[in-house]
Amino acid sequence: MSELTLLVLRIGFLLLLWAFIFAVVYALRSDLFGQRARRMPPEAPTASAFPSSPISAAPPRPAPVTSPVSAPVPAGSAPGANSATATRLVIVSGSKQGQELALGGEPLTIGRSSESGLVIRDDYTSTHHARLMLWDENWVIQDLDSTNGTFLNGARVTVPTPVPLNTPVKIGTTSFELRR
Amino acid sequence: MQTPTDAGTSPQVAAPLGSGQRSTFTNTIRLRLRVPSKQRNLELVLLIFASIINVSAIALVQLGALHKIEGSMIGLTIGLAVLGLVFHVVLRFFASQADPFILPVSALLNGIGIAEIHRLDIGNKLSGLNAIGVRQVMWTAMAMVIALAVILLVRNHRVLQRYRYVAMFVGILLLVLPMLPGIGSTKFGARLWIEIGPFSFQPGELAKIALAIFFAGYLVTSRDSLSMVGKKILWMRFPRARDLGPILVLWAAAMAVLIFQHDLGTSLLYFGLFLVMIYVATGRVSWVVLGLGMFLAGAFVASRLLSYVSGRFDNWLDAFNPNIYDATGGSYQLVQGIFGLAHGGLIGTGLGEGRPGIVPLAESDYIVASLGEELGLAGLFAIIALYLLFVSRGFRIGFAGQDDFGRLLGIGLSFVVGLQVFIVIGGITRVIPLTGLTTPFLAAGGSSLVANWIIAALLLRLSDSVRNQPRLVVE
């Protein structure tokens, strides 16, 4: 085996090693730079749903006609209601309107990242947007420094805030309520 | 009733009514079939890539040192690659959403270590079962089987939280074991090994896992009292005197390891692990300031009173002094390692073509210097980048975790690997005093391999339960 062949093999081995590292880094690029945002289809109601106008989102939305759930009690009717009894999270507006998710006792993360418990992929959602936790007897929503904010009944959430039953929480173009 | 264990699979997402029972049923099936493939396929590609690098490393070692290729060692490495594939297949069935990078990175680091140990065996003319490389292959196989057992037995990491006090006692027992007369044995001035018959084992390596589990479980329950109250001095909030109990106990334990077992590295490792976990749990810098101050004060006093600690400091600060270089227990090993690294230069002498065997303990404590000589700066940085990837995946798993115990455990387990790499490589390159710790996955030694593969298994299990999450996707 000549010197030259060994030199070529040696450099080749180092290149192979670095190729492996770059392959791994390329594969986890979405972790480094975040998930790619998806363009919303043009017919999406972007104007009214834009989070910078919380006033328009403030009045509680009636349950959509297509919703499979029973008509909700109007929001705010039971401000001190103990939300620990909530057993499901119902999407009340947005593209998955009417779908629901069973709530256990464990926290639920919300964001564009596929590691979130509730994945919302639109232009306004941050990678790790918010978190819904059961504190003592209440479900509490915590905004994780998201760019466009989380809105509880129209008001932007800045500190972890208890979520009463049947009150809309808005993230991007999606809102959901906790129901019994 | 919903339990956390079945929270992962998607079928809880109820389809809107009106689409009927039948479509709900088909949705469920389709989602289930789609889930497993992506992560695992990526892992398979990377694992095959890593196995090719491992086999070619062995081939290069033999070409460089013997100018011919011998089949037996290559056969053993291919056997390990097959075991890696078995590991992968088991993950497909039992942890399908686990992180795809941990297994290939661990396998690659382990394989590079085996290649370099094999190279030192050729230099020392060891073969058959006397060869350290062959024994390392056997230990690797055993460690991977144990890691598989951990994945199969621990189906949900929250179970570990229940055994936090058991973990504490196991950790302390493992730390104390080498001090017992009869089975404890002293090697290279440190009392860290137990010997039963022909086997020697370093129980402290396993203790770091037990202690990480205990710290995570303990800090989840008590962090409020550790973080909320206390006096504010300057810009930091210091804890109350009565909350100092745990840190004092840990400090005393670290000092006991330093004084009775003569091991600076282990004591730094455990104390550093505790400090980082308490910092992550409470978010208070004052704990780190307090703890580092206490440790540095203790180490300073120890360096005045204990001759071996002060010797380590002299070797570090004045390594090239001829008197210290020639002294027994002097800086000979340190300086030879640095000469080796310098000989390697930018791209190294090539596998099998350097002279790493001159350094004492080249296959265990000094494996990084051996690799640095033969792969050069470029190769050493690649190895450090692999550790960086491993540790960053662990932090990522901790960050994405849904429960506090899992978050702390993920951070703790991956940080302990990172800290150990820093202590070892920092010691070899004279950034900090040299201490005898093993390089995770690379160094020869069964206990270290078993412990690090168990850490990899726990991180895989954690990442599986974390990722099994998306329960509803809105797009």
Image (cartoon, rainbow, N blue to C red):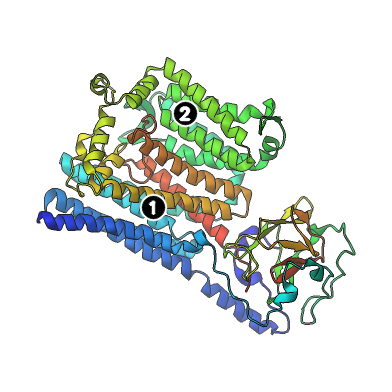
Which amino acid type is marked by label 1?
Ser
Quadrant in which the C terminus of chain A is drawn: bottom right
Question: Which residue is identified by label 1?
Answer: B106
On screen, residue B260 versus residue B26, left or right, reads left
Q: Position of residue B342 (x, y in %)?
A: 24, 39
Q: Where residue B338 appears, x then y in whole percent? A: 27, 35
Q: Residues within 10 Å of mark 1 (few under 14, many from 20)?
A: many
Chain letter of mark 1 equals B
Residue A37 — which label? none
What residue sits right under mark 2 in the picture?
A: B176
Host chain of mark 2: B
Closest to the camera, between mark 1 and mark 2, is 1
Q: Is the N terminus of chain A in the top left, top right, bottom left or bottom right quadrant?
A: bottom left
In the image, residue B405 above or below residue B320: below
Point 37% across, 57% down: residue: A21
Q: Residues within 10 Å of mark 2 (few under 14, many from 20)?
A: some
Tag count: 2
* Residue A132 place in picture, x, y as percent: 71, 58
Describe residue A29's horizontal placement relative to residue A143 as left or right.
left
Depth check, front residue: B189 or B180: B189
Q: What SS does tag 1 mark? A: helix
Q: Is residue B1 above or below residue B439?
A: below
Q: Position of residue B202 (x, y in %)?
A: 39, 35
Marked residue nearer the N-terminal end (1 or 2): 1
